[in-house]
Image: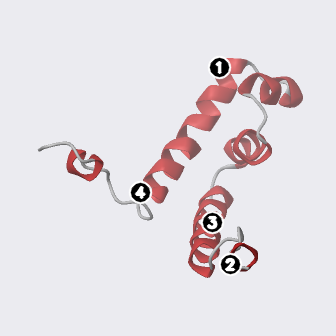
Amino acid sequence: MAEKLSSSAASPETLTFGAEIRAAVADGASRLPEPQRDVFALYAGSGLSMAEVARILGLTLPAVKTRCSVPTSECARTSSRFVRPLKITDCGAAA
């Protein structure tokens, strides 16, 4: 009976955390200049490769990489608010 009571559904905390991260990314993306926003949306939002984004938008691969670098860096900076830095001691190794 206990097996039937367990659930693989995400906890309310996990759902809230995910919603906060999605909102932060969406907010940041909305402030990007349109060329960066278009590339970022296709690359990060749709899961396309940079080569596929370049082909779809008629850009060179270096142009896509350049336009994606700022949003990607901003996402990393923004997400650092949600995740604490990992320390070696957190992994059980001696400091």
Q: CA distance from mark 2 to mark 4?
A: 38 Å
Residue contact at pointers 2 and 4, CB within 8 angstroms: no
Q: CA distance from mark 1 to mark 2?
A: 55 Å
Residue 51 occupies quadrant: top right
Residue 26 occupies quadrant: bottom right
The colour scheme applied to this rendered structure is secondary structure
Which residue occupies 82% across, 26% down? 52
Question: Which residue is the site of mark 4?
Answer: 80
In the image, taking residue 34 as reference, residue 84 lies left or right, namely left
Q: CA distance from mark 4 to mark 3?
A: 15 Å
Question: Which residue is the site of mark 3?
Answer: 27
Q: Which mark is residue 37?
A: none
- The amino acid beneath tag 4 is Ser
- The amino acid beneath tag 2 is Ala
Tell me the mark number nearer the camera, choosing from 1 and 4: 4
Question: Which residue is the site of mark 2?
Answer: 2
Look at the picture and state if 2 lies above or below 35.
below
Residue 69 occupies quadrant: top right
Could you tell me residue 90's position as x and y percent? 27, 52
- The amino acid beneath tag 1 is Pro
Question: Which residue is the site of mark 1?
Answer: 62
